[in-house]
Amino acid sequence: MRFFSDNAAAAHPAVLDAIAASNRIDTAYDGDEWSGKLDAAFSDLFETRVRALWVTTGTAANCLALAAMCPPHGGIICHKDAHIENDEAGAPGFYTQGAKLILVDGPGAKVTPEAATAAIARIRKDVHQVQPHALSITNATEYGLAFSADEVAALGELSRAHELGFHMDGARFANAIASTGASPADVTWRSGVRALSFGFVKNGGLNAEALVLFKTELADEILVRRKRAGHLLSKGRMLAAQILALLDKDLWLANARAANAAAQALAQAAPDRLVYPVEANEVFLRATADEAARLRSQGFDFYDWGTSEIRLVTSWDQNGDAVAKLAAAIGSL
Amino acid sequence: MRFFSDNAAAAHPAVLDAIAASNRIDTAYDGDEWSGKLDAAFSDLFETRVRALWVTTGTAANCLALAAMCPPHGGIICHKDAHIENDEAGAPGFYTQGAKLILVDGPGAKVTPEAATAAIARIRKDVHQVQPHALSITNATEYGLAFSADEVAALGELSRAHELGFHMDGARFANAIASTGASPADVTWRSGVRALSFGFVKNGGLNAEALVLFKTELADEILVRRKRAGHLLSKGRMLAAQILALLDKDLWLANARAANAAAQALAQAAPDRLVYPVEANEVFLRATADEAARLRSQGFDFYDWGTSEIRLVTSWDQNGDAVAKLAAAIGSL
Amino acid sequence: MRFFSDNAAAAHPAVLDAIAASNRIDTAYDGDEWSGKLDAAFSDLFETRVRALWVTTGTAANCLALAAMCPPHGGIICHKDAHIENDEAGAPGFYTQGAKLILVDGPGAKVTPEAATAAIARIRKDVHQVQPHALSITNATEYGLAFSADEVAALGELSRAHELGFHMDGARFANAIASTGASPADVTWRSGVRALSFGFVKNGGLNAEALVLFKTELADEILVRRKRAGHLLSKGRMLAAQILALLDKDLWLANARAANAAAQALAQAAPDRLVYPVEANEVFLRATADEAARLRSQGFDFYDWGTSEIRLVTSWDQNGDAVAKLAAAIGSL
Amino acid sequence: MRFFSDNAAAAHPAVLDAIAASNRIDTAYDGDEWSGKLDAAFSDLFETRVRALWVTTGTAANCLALAAMCPPHGGIICHKDAHIENDEAGAPGFYTQGAKLILVDGPGAKVTPEAATAAIARIRKDVHQVQPHALSITNATEYGLAFSADEVAALGELSRAHELGFHMDGARFANAIASTGASPADVTWRSGVRALSFGFVKNGGLNAEALVLFKTELADEILVRRKRAGHLLSKGRMLAAQILALLDKDLWLANARAANAAAQALAQAAPDRLVYPVEANEVFLRATADEAARLRSQGFDFYDWGTSEIRLVTSWDQNGDAVAKLAAAIGSL
């Protein structure tokens, strides 16, 4: 009974079916029928004209966007617990070719306008210090918190005032939307976001993520950068098909709701132990090493988070029985 | 009837089956059961201990290897018609962070020891000129020629003498082996090759290529670089499974033989028109614009190669009937 | 009697005087009195408003300009014998972070519109091939030929048509101007050049070169890049002072004329041996190894150029007696 | 009466004399007589065989060393107030091509073994997090504190244990040595330091710094990197001559003692206001905005340091009268 991470789950059957359906000869790279539908599909979803392209990882989506928004000599404001800072092996440094991550703190891995403003204010406006060129937030955050449209809009306002590119790492965008009920448009471009890494792999996809560009003029350069990074797959149709399958009839939203519901079930088992409110599909619980060991002895797998917390992540296909058992086990600690 | 490129073909059914079979929860990234079998599978095939890792594109495989072999300030000797020079959007410059491709000429896109030696001799041994650190060849070449083990060994000797890393771009390695009948070991590490990009996508794979390291001590650094380039997929098991399926019972070799046989059928239809001997699955024919138009009017699709040649590429699943028709059409020109 | 290179000559006494005169406390970096005069001094010389900044090497000047004109994924058209290709240790790759030099051939190291047009035509307009973003020429060329304003204008027209940044490496710009008598304005911005590396070190300077930007909006970014490359010196006033001293009363032009005159004296000694017309301060002569040895035995030092040519370079302070002796020795071969 | 920074001071007359003395034709770059003496001169000073090379800025010295010690995908542990983090415009990111600065805190900008150990312990040993490859400290620190040999040795021990390259930014190395009286050998290679940026520009030099390599096998690669970064000057002899002049009869030490003594005079005027002990040539004083204004009104120039401190830096040639007046003014606040 694994609660390590949603990125290890199976792909949804509809995704495998879509791959099989696209498994016939077509134009290579992204000149095929399926890839050609992505712009329209995401434009519909976001209620505005966007450009959208497939990549195979969130790291690639994040870094392609950031590299297009920030020159090698610039800086990117992000949270100190952001995935791009902690879990991408320095990929932003590679893709931007040396840009600096300007770290801010804030509860639950949320960048706040106050923290970002203070970080900017600390930077002398001269050639000796790296100047900020972009802002990146994660939604849902690394601690499972979802941004409201208003929260994003406040950061959007700040990014406009300081002429910062504004990127959202949406590895769990689906879980955030499922949680807040906000419209995808409100929480992104209507609030100033210019590029979104829209995650599918953690939500039923096999190996396709989408990079959605609200600032559509970034697309042509990013297509070049994607190729140059070795991320232009020959049979891109089988990535596009995955994404289209998950967008179809809002399967992405149904999957996210299922994962979120499982997390809620766990959260309700131990409201006093919650480190953060559970707004998406991640549950951080206070637990001693002994308590963690007791859970593991009952067959539950998960990560420790430091020495006094554990992290439980639920997936779109999390077994209901396992969730119920884990909830009970947590309640009994 | 498409003869554009083998990279647009369908994946082999056994590959889709393998993906489906691995579509259950397992450890993320490459900690899973399937990824864990790659080293052994390729060690068997190559009769020596190797390290092997999956990536999704040949560009990634090539450039990860080259970046590990050549510092940013070094040079990589390759043919002026090499894929890394012409068709990867400068990816070697991105991955190596500025290394220089030192171009040589030679018939059929083959690097010869003479050409490489001359290129090295032209470089002054000082800090003003970029010094060579690696050598990269393509087998089968971009014009469909296969290297013999002796030819590779001569270059291996040269690479040892000049302390060059020696890389083989094997996007069509299977077709080369199917053509020459050489043992995979003889044409690679026994002849001095230290890293091989072993292509599967053009030969029945969906989106998995293998980077095989005979110089096994490169592996740990390349694993870091792979992650940093955004090429460490969460569900790597579904890449590993593809490769294992193609290695199983030498399906990779059967597929390559089928593609090569189709190319031979075309070649025999017009021996006088051949620009190069047909040794793999690519056929370059002299044809006027008018002749090319006549073929297209009969339903055959392919690329022009300059103004007086055409390129025909056959795939593992090339329709036999279409091949026969094209052969006849060529014969009737 | 050394004819190796003008870059090894002494600095002009006026340059040392200027350094001494600026050797008092002032604002660090480029906030000082002398640095503050560069824009105006070069604007006067070029008859238009320019931005100008000091660096210590031509390589830095060239590469800062190119990096501001060409993204990491772009290409720079230049001659295959250009300094940036052959003698800067791959610095363009470092500064641009991986851009590609797209090489063309042409007599005397001159890029011609025909050669550049052909190079551009060979590049498919897709994401697989590196697209040209800049054009760089050297004036005087690496073989001592000076561009006429018309020749530059033809390339300027081409650069406009293809939206290429247009850079001139003027390591020997002074010698070119002294040779053709063209106005500095005509041969640069009036002909489409957007950035000029204006060399002083080979022409009486100690360690100051100027980067002159006709496209003034590049300046702010280049100031950042200069700092980031470690080229913002604390006591920049002593670089600016050197340049101002050489601009004063056209000392740069007088120095270049002296060097050119010495080259002419050598050229006239053996008109039949000239490989190229002598238009600046470099003389390439056909000479056998035996002939070269005979010159050396008489005390003359110079570089061989391949196996059947020698290169003689004259400096602003080349000893007249030595020039006369060498001319005589060449005449007597 | 300027107390902004020692980097704005005049060069010592002996330095100008040395430049003049080397102002005659010699081999270009670093093949000249003066450059050829650097290895021996520094080997004498450090009582061991070293390789030493000139560059024009401390940023270049620091970053060349770090790039040779840390791969693009690695991390460099340094203090959050280090010059390489705050005042080099991201140059480490440029030179290393994307390596990460792993920041630690500590009093007076000193890296402590405890802080470094804790930083290392926080990093998971996997491919998702950037692994440390180097450690860089500044001596004297950015707050004017000098490391003892024992303090350095403790960090040297740590760097050995974790296989980290160990670099010392010695922009004010002379002031540190003048302060502690430690032998240059004890505080560097005998304590594990492998590369030292030895500053001269802040201490009487014009535009020459030295990079001293105790790990001599780094030199060849760094020579290539220096050229590639545009830092190989044609007339390098006039940089080497500066350094040799300052090494001669320990002029560097005399200069540093003079600067330190001036700082002591200021410190003694207001011991209660000192933010840090004054161990080199920088004095940080608590002062209100009003107090700072009163000092400025008396003709003293200096930087504010935040809102309640001021920074005073003294130079080798600081006018004694001005120092006495400033000391008196501070005492009278």
Image (tube, coloured by chain):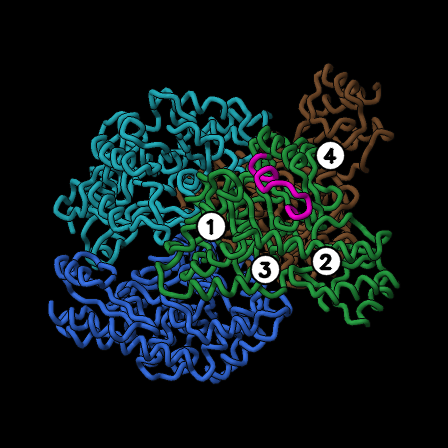
Chain colours: A blue, B green, C brown, D cyan
Amino acid type at image mark 1: Leu
Q: Are marks 2 and 4 in contact (CB under 8 Å)?
A: no
Please check whether the numbered discs 4 and 3 fall on a single chain. Answer: no
Secondary structure state at the residue bearing disc 4: strand
Q: Residues within 10 Å of mark 3 (few under 14, many from 20)?
A: many
Res B53 label: 1
Magenta region, residue range: B176-190
Please state the chain letter of the residue tagged with numbered disc 2 in the rendered image. Answer: B
Coordinates of residue A280 in the picture (x, y in percent): 29, 74
Coordinates of residue A141 in the picture (x, y in percent): 31, 69
Disc 3 versus disc 1: nearer the observer:
3
Real-space CA distance between mark 4 and mark 3, rounded to the nearest whole angstrom:
59 Å
Res B262 label: 2
Please tell me which of labels 2 and 3 falls first in the chain: 3
Residue B141 appears anywhere in the view: yes
Q: Is residue A10 magenta?
A: no
Please check whether the numbered discs 3 and 1 fall on a single chain. Answer: yes
Please check whether the numbered discs 1 and 4 fall on a single chain. Answer: no
Please state the chain letter of the residue tagged with numbered disc 4 in the rendered image. Answer: C
B186 and A252: which is toward the camera:
B186
